[in-house]
Amino acid sequence: MNLDETDRKILNKLQIDGRITNQDLAKHCNLSPSACFDRTRKLRDNGYISSYVALLDPHLNQRPLLIFIEVLLNRTTGDIFRQFAEATRRQRDILECHMDTSKNPWRLRA
């Protein structure tokens, strides 16, 4: 699937407001509601939209500090990734995990 300007408009607007109604999204993108619904469904079906989430206010949720840590794994097999993912899911204070595969030689070390 190749994205056109209208698809990108839909994605940009949904990224800003994932709860926008199809009617309002259609108006914003100059589409009929049915055409907008079809395009959004195609974007979702083709993986361009992976999920809809709620962004929580960290202060109101007693999590005002965001900390990034680096975890180095001895091995990087699928089994190890699954075990790591399961272990992090059990920790309620871990909100997200990101994998960085870059080999940055000037990364700061403590």
Image (cartoon, rainbow, N blue to C red):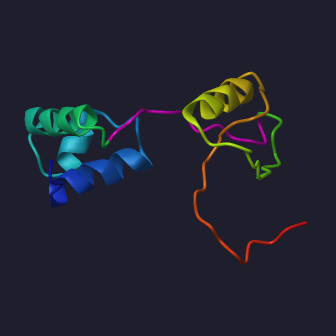
Relative to 70, does residue 107 appear above or below in the rendering? below
* Quadrant (top left/top right/bottom left/bottom right) for the C terminus: bottom right
Place residue 83 in its image quadrant.
Answer: top right
Q: Which residues are magenta?
A: 49-60
Q: Residue at x 60, y 56 (%)?
A: 100
Taken as a whole, is the magenta stretch helix, strand or loop? loop
78 falls in the magenta region: no
Place residue 73 in its image quadrant.
Answer: top right
Residue 91: x and y in percent read 78, 26
The reply, left or right, for residue 37 in relation to residue 95 is left
The reply, left or right, for residue 30 in relation to residue 54 is left
Residue 46: x and y in percent read 23, 37
Place residue 77 in its image quadrant.
Answer: top right
Q: Residue at x 30, y 43 (%)?
A: 48
The reply, left or right, for residue 22 in relation to residue 69 is left
The reply, left or right, for residue 82 in relation to residue 58 is left
Nearest the eye: 107 or 17: 107
Residue 95: x and y in percent read 69, 36
